Image (tube, rainbow, N blue to C red):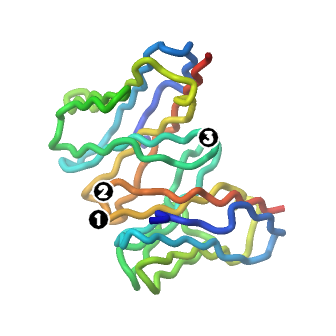
Amino acid sequence: NAGVTQTPKFQVLKTGQSMTLQCAQDMNHEYMSWYRQDPGMGLRLIHYSVGAGITDQGEVPNGYNVSRSTTEDFPLRLLSAAPSQTSVYFCASSRPPSMEQYFGPGTRLTVT
Amino acid sequence: AQKVTQAQTEISVVEKEDVTLDCVYETRDTTYYLFWYKQPPSGELVFLIRRNSFDEQNEISGRYSWNFQKSTSSFNFTITASQVVDSAVYFCALSEAGSNDYKLSFGAGTTVTVRA
């Protein structure tokens, strides 16, 4: 099993550009989530999904969209990048939600 | 309000010393889950242990041990005979069964540096 994979590993965007961070898991996990990690702020939940076709907002959803068309994939879309979105983004999955979440390797995003 | 508090920001030890990381949590739920994660310099987040609120049995796994005490809302983690490879940021996290999003509320992390 590859576990949770994320692409790209690094990305630099200009303000106003859009892009999609990819996340996939091969463990048949129901629950998937996106976090961002910022110095001094810890990890904060952006969006989550409890199954295919079901998504909901976390604590910092503004500026991000998600979709869950399959159990395996949970992409995170930045609509119009802003410097405040410079962060490290982690995707995680678990089954069921109360179990331990396994994290992907992260995507380091810089918005200039 | 901070749900998980890790009061120690940084700990530096010499190899083979024991290290204990403190974690205090706050919740009104009777059912909740506590976790420890490790983030080495390479940046990935590695799951170490999960405990539910009904399981106060403490555990030892190799050089790692955990002390869960509901009476003091603490979930401390000890590395015995530390090694340089233990150098990392360690996060304590809480998930509350009463929340709809099952999010992990992370503490701020404790940076452990083990010197050879």
- In the rendering, at what x and y percent does residue B95 appear? 33, 51
Find disc 1 in the rendering and name its residue.
A96
Q: Give the numbered dot on residue A87.
A: none
Q: Is residue A49 left or right of residue A105?
A: left
Instruction: Report crowding for label 2: few under 14, some 14 to 19, many 20 or more residues within 10 A (C-alpha).
Output: some
Find disc 3 in the rendering and name its residue.
A40
Q: Residues at badges 1 and 2 in contact (C-beta under 8 Å)?
A: yes
Q: Earlier in the sequence, mark 1 or mark 3?
A: 3
Q: Is residue B25 left or right of residue A41?
A: left
Task: Name the residue at 31% across, 65% down.
Answer: A95
Instruction: Report crowding for label 3: few under 14, some 14 to 19, many 20 or more residues within 10 A (C-alpha).
Output: few
Q: Is residue B44 left or right of residue A17?
A: left
Q: Nearer the viewer, mark 3 or mark 2?
A: 2
Instruction: Report crowding for label 1: few under 14, some 14 to 19, many 20 or more residues within 10 A (C-alpha).
Output: some
Specify the amino acid type for callout 2: Met
Q: Give the numbered dot on residue A99.
A: 2
Give the alpha-carbon distance from disc 1 to disc 3, as whole Å: 30 Å
Give the alpha-carbon distance from disc 3 to disc 2, as whole Å: 26 Å
Q: Is residue B91 above or below residue B45?
A: above
- In the rendering, at what x and y percent does residue A109 appear? 72, 60
